[in-house]
Image (cartoon, rainbow, N blue to C red):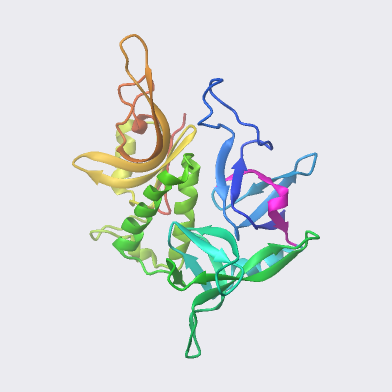
């Protein structure tokens, strides 16, 4: 496998084309070929190139798909990837989006870094007793001849970032990412994988957190689960032990982030395009097209039943359930 680094945040596609795929000739709002997006500075694995060499089929930390080759940089050897990714001193992006500049005066805008991105840090604002106006990080850069180099990037010291790994607290783990996810509604990224890319990156902030931090109310949730079929009550029992904000729920063509249980209802946050409901003569498609918090009974009156009925996979670091269908 080859390795590369992303130099500009852009789309990752289901197929190597920028043409859109619509459900109907007039449904331009929803492109079925749009998978998600990848941010600048992200490390990827490369499986294959298209015949015209314009696209690369890549693996990120959370998804596979096609990416425009000109927006990534090939690494000469695997050691380069490991060195960049495993730099001990790193700056974590904890805000929804953060501007990265090419100069310390913060005038030459380069790209937006998103929540979950991390970069090797070269110089924090306060270093050796000298107070600086910005952070200095290492970023990948494509030269005119296409060669990979690493340059200095700069972020304001007032940006929503964090030096090193975060300590686990309910506010940081639950409240902060939720606010960032809701802010995505204004960003126009309505694919569910777009939301999940933010959360997957955010989990990296806690990579060194001790496993005991995931024990709640004295109950150890570090256990495995054996496949037992697509049974509704079985899935409820799995969710009763699942960890909110660390559990993903999948169904065909969709993914959600589990938030927990309240008054007997299970809740999730997800990017959803539409839901089918019962109509007088036939099912009616109700357009949503944004990030929502909903209980998993959503859609129960439609032809495909509720979201929970349709869930085929529940997983986190501790529990995994997969239906046999």
The answer to whether 46 appears left or right of 36 in the picture is: right
Q: On the rendered structure, is 119 left or right of 281?
A: right
* Quarter of image, res 165: bottom left
Q: In which quarter of the image is residue 149?
A: bottom right
Q: Which of 132 and 320 is in front in this view?
A: 132
Q: Looking at the picture, does residue 275 appear above or below residue 79?
A: above
The relative height of residue 151 versus residue 312 in the rendered view (above or below) is below
Instruction: Please give the name of the residue rendered at 48% of the width and 32% of the height, measured from the top-left corner.
Output: 252
Q: In which quarter of the image is residue 309?
A: top left
Q: Which residue is found at the position 68% from the left and 69% from the top?
A: 150
- Looking at the image, the residue that sits furthest to the left is 263
Residue at 73% of width from left, 45% of height from top? Answer: 48
Residue 78 drawn at (x, y percent): 71, 63
**Dominant secondary structure (helix, strand or loop) of the stretch shown in magenta:** strand
Residue 68 location in percent, x, y? 69, 46
Q: Is residue 111 visible?
A: yes
- Taking the spot 42% from the left edge, 71% from the top edge, the residue there is 158
> As rendered, which of 260 and 153 lies closer to the eye?
153
């Amino acid at each position: 496998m080859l390795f590369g680094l992303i130099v500009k945040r852009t789309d990752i596609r289901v197929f190597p084309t920028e043409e859109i795929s619509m459900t109907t000739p007039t449904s331009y709002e929803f492109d079925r070929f749009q998978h998600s997006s990848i941010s600048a500075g992200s490390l990827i694995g490369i499986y294959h190139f298209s015949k015209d060499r314009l696209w690369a089929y890549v693996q990120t930390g959370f998804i596979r798909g096609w990416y425009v080759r000109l927006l990534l940089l090939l690494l000469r050897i695997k050691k380069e990837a490991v060195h960049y990714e495993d730099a001990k001193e790193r700056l974590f992006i904890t805000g929804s989006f953060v501007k990265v500049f090419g100069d310390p005066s913060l005038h030459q805008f380069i790209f937006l870094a998103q929540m979950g991105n991390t970069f090797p840090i070269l110089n924090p604002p306060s270093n050796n007793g000298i107070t600086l106006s910005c952070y200095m990080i290492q970023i990948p850069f494509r030269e005119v001849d296409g060669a990979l180099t690493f340059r200095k990037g700069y972020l304001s010291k007032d940006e929503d970032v964090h030096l090193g790994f975060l300590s686990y607290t309910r506010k940081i783990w639950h409240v902060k990412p939720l606010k960032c996810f809701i802010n995505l509604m204004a960003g126009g990224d309505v694919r569910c994988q777009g939301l999940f890319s933010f959360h997957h990156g955010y989990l990296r902030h806690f990579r060194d957190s001790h496993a005991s931090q995931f024990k709640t109310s004295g109950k150890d949730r570090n256990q495995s689960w054996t496949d037992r079929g697509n049974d509704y009550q079985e899935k409820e029992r799995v969710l009763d032990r699942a960890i909110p904000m660390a559990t993903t729920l999948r169904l065909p063509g969709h993914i959600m982030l589990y938030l927990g249980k309240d008054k007997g209802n299970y809740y999730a946050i997800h990017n959803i395009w539409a839901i089918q409901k019962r109509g007088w003569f036939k099912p009616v498609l109700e357009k949503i097209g944004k990030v929502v918090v909903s209980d998993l009974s959503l859609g129960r009156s439609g032809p495909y039943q509720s979201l929970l009925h349709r869930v085929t996979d529940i997983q986190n670091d501790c529990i995994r359930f997969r239906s046999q269908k």
